Image (tube, rainbow, N blue to C red):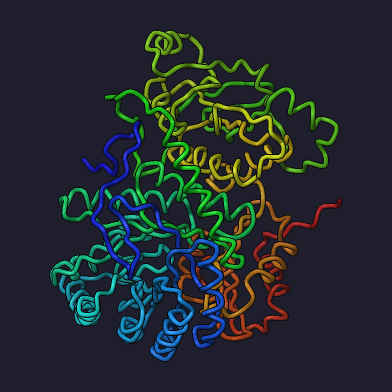
Amino acid sequence: MLRYCSDFFRFQRRPTRVVMVGNVAIGGDNPVRIQSMLTSDTRDTAACIQEALGLVAAGCEIVRITAQTRVYAAHLQHIKAGLLAANCAVPLVADIHFKPDAAMEAARWVEKVRINPGNFVDKKKFAVREYSDAQYAEELERIQEAFVPLVRLCQEMGRAMRIGTNHGSLSDRIMNRYGDTPSGMVESALEFAEIARSLDYHNFVFSMKASNPKVMIEAYRLLVARLEARGSDWNYPIHLGVTEAGDGEDGRIKSAIGIGSLLSDGIGDTIRVSLTEDAVYEIPVAQALVRSLAAETARPPLPPQGDPIGYDPFNYARRASQRQEVQALGLGGGETVRVFTSQAQFQAVAHKLKQLGEYQPEIVTETSGLRTLNPLDHDAVAAVNDAPEPQLVTLPDGWPHPVIASYRLLAARLDARHAIVLKDTCFPSQDETRPFLDALLPAAAHLGSLLCDGIGDAVLIQGEAAPAASLRLAYNILQAAGSRIFKTDYVACPSCGRTLFNLQSTTARIREATGHLKGVRIAVMGCIVNGPGEMADADFGYVGGAPGKINLYVGKTAVEFNIPEAEAVQRLTDLIRAHGRWLPVPES
């Protein structure tokens, strides 16, 4: 049976070998390392040096730079030399897509090369064809021919490597055998790892990035389980990231769900929070996320438990509670995940419910019939399970143990018919001056992890004291976890040297034009590297096709090409109208 962590109810960091990236050690007993990526054009040496120095000053430990072609990769020599001249020895990582020759050039100058198995050799044309075993083997031989020289060069020069699969850029070969799935993502990476190991090269890490936190979490878990099944010497470190997370609160929440969930299970040795903002703003978010995990794992662990977890961690299915009627709303049994609030917080916002828009309080905790339950008290659990009617259950305030593990245990011991209300913390905050990020990150990590495992029929935010902010946070976590879609959903990639337009201003314009389209998912991609694939879950896509030119997509199909950037947002809204998804802007 596949298993991705040693104990679902007690934190233990996954043991890995140490991989050296220049002077930075990844894995083993080393701290979780913080990474980011330059947005400057790789050919602009001065700009890249300045931006890298700013990232390092903010706390970035490893800096990634795109290298689209061999010409771009050659500029890494000058960037590296300039940083060393400035007494900055931060390791650099070349980000490679499509161009093995660029990887070969980059490995001469930087400490690490990131390759994407989906496009290092294979091409992605969304072609539908069947591969015979012989044809499949022939493709693998082509990969070996292109990849072996890079592995040998990295060995010779002491370089590290990241074998980084992206959900949005699986090759046609993988897609047609495994589909657009976590299994395909893992298999794509393992093919390259097998080649590296055959040459006795082990200085590499894995990543499994996706824009959908559920897909990302399942892919990483499956990867680790597959590595564990292969033996103890497959203990390679893991880099975590939610790609195309977006900006603002939504980007931070989505990143915290994906990264925080895995860190909470002991998976992850380096992280990058990918925001559609200046890269320097990614660093404090990543640092705060790691601190939040450290604080949570420092709580007293649950006593050793022998219970099965009661859900499949590799395939999402919502826990099968029975429907109840609570304050005239359906809860459980397939009903939408509800938002609870305290009586005091409800009274604080009752006079301005219209101004809250979609962020409405739904159920008041004190009069809901919600009962607290200690999952370690077998008699109390048995009493609830013996009740003739389904109950509404949560952990008690003051509960000292880690939140995720405790709700897992509650769900394991409670009959599935009983609905569970998830709290982000069992220690309600009364401090309205507390930095919002300090409430947002643990709430998203705790609630999002459980929701992505199908646990939870309602949520209650207690770590944010401000009533309106706590409601907004609850709804935005539900949206990011895919549990409740109540507004326009955006998939927006972070800027990098490949980006063909200003992602921040463009995303803002698209939000202004489309933000009222409840339930429509729009992807905003700076280039075509991951664009069409990461838009597999999106309804419409806005993708940089060439400098100053935009391609528009419906799903993952390009339908309009080379639109002048000045016209592209209007053409996007026209496309949405043409497909019957447009709604009039509501009156304020």
Q: Residue at x 73, y 43 (%)?
A: 358
Q: Which of 577 and 214 is in front in this view?
A: 214
Residue 109 is situated, as x and y percent measured from the top left of the image, at 35, 83
Res. 188 visible in picture: no
Nearer to me, 98 or 88: 88
Q: Position of residue 415 (x, y in %)?
A: 41, 20
The answer to whether 303 appears left or right of 286 in the picture is left
* Left or right for 215, reference 253: left
- Quarter holding residue 282: bottom right
Q: Quadrant of the N terminus?
A: top left
Q: In this view, does 262 lie above or below 350?
A: below
Residue shown at 38% from the left, 75% from the top: 124
Left or right: 253 in relation to 342: left
* Farthest bottom residue in view: 71
Along the line of sight, which residue is nearer the eye, 558 or 396? Answer: 396
Image height of 395 relative to 431, above or below: above
Residue 170, position in %: x, y? 36, 67
Observer able to see residue 399: yes
Which residue is found at the position 61% from the left and 55% from the top? 489
